[in-house]
Image: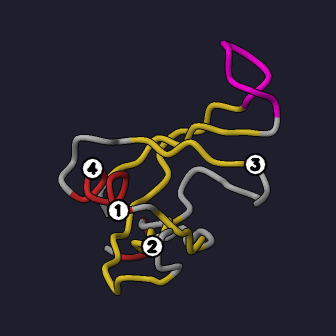
């Protein structure tokens, strides 16, 4: 019964991700992102991580999509203020 289902759509954030970090997220060994808190990240939002090669300053064309499952704000536990740690889960 669809009337009992609540659909929640969050915002999508497109982010550059360097190859070693991108590959670790893609293969599942890295389940978090450390980022500047320069966007309104919220639990349930989508991250579109785009592989970016810093030496050539170009995107490779590879992308991975993850959902934000947890947010740990900086200014505590040794995390610099102005940064966040985002827990990631598969879509």
> Per the image, is 87 magenta?
no
**Spatial separation of the CA atoms under disc 1 and disc 4:** 9 Å
- Find the distance from the CA under tag 3 to the CA under tag 2: 20 Å
Mark 4 / mark 3, whichever is N-terminal: 4
For this orientation, the residue located farthest to the front is 55
Q: Which residue is mark 1?
A: 19
Mark 4 to mark 2 CA distance (whole Å): 14 Å
Q: Residues within 10 Å of mark 2 (few under 14, many from 20)?
A: many
Which residue in the structure is indicated by mark 4? 24
Residue behind mark 3? 37
91 or 53, which is in the foreground? 53
- If you read the primary sequence from the N terminus, does the residue marked by circle 1 or circle 4 appear first? 1
Q: Is residue 23 left or right of residue 14?
A: left
Q: Main secondary structure of the magenta part?
A: loop
Residue named by callout 2: 52
Q: CA distance from mark 1 to mark 3?
A: 22 Å
Marks 4 and 3, how far apart in space?
Answer: 22 Å
Number of on-image labels: 4
Q: Measured from the top left, where is residue 5 in percent x and y?
A: 42, 67
Q: Which residues are magenta?
A: 74-81
Which of 26/9 is in front? 26
């Amino acid at each position: 019964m669809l009337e009992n289902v609540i659909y929640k759509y969050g915002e999508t954030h497109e982010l550059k991700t360097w190859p070693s970090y991108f590959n670790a997220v893609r293969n599942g060994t890295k389940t978090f992102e450390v980022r500047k808190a320069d966007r309104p990240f919220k639990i349930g939002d989508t991250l579109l991580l785009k592989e970016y090669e810093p030496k050539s300053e170009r995107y490779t064309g590879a992308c991975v999509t993850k959902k934000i499952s947890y947010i740990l704000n900086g200014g505590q536990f040794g995390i610099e203020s102005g940064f966040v740690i985002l827990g990631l889960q598969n879509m």
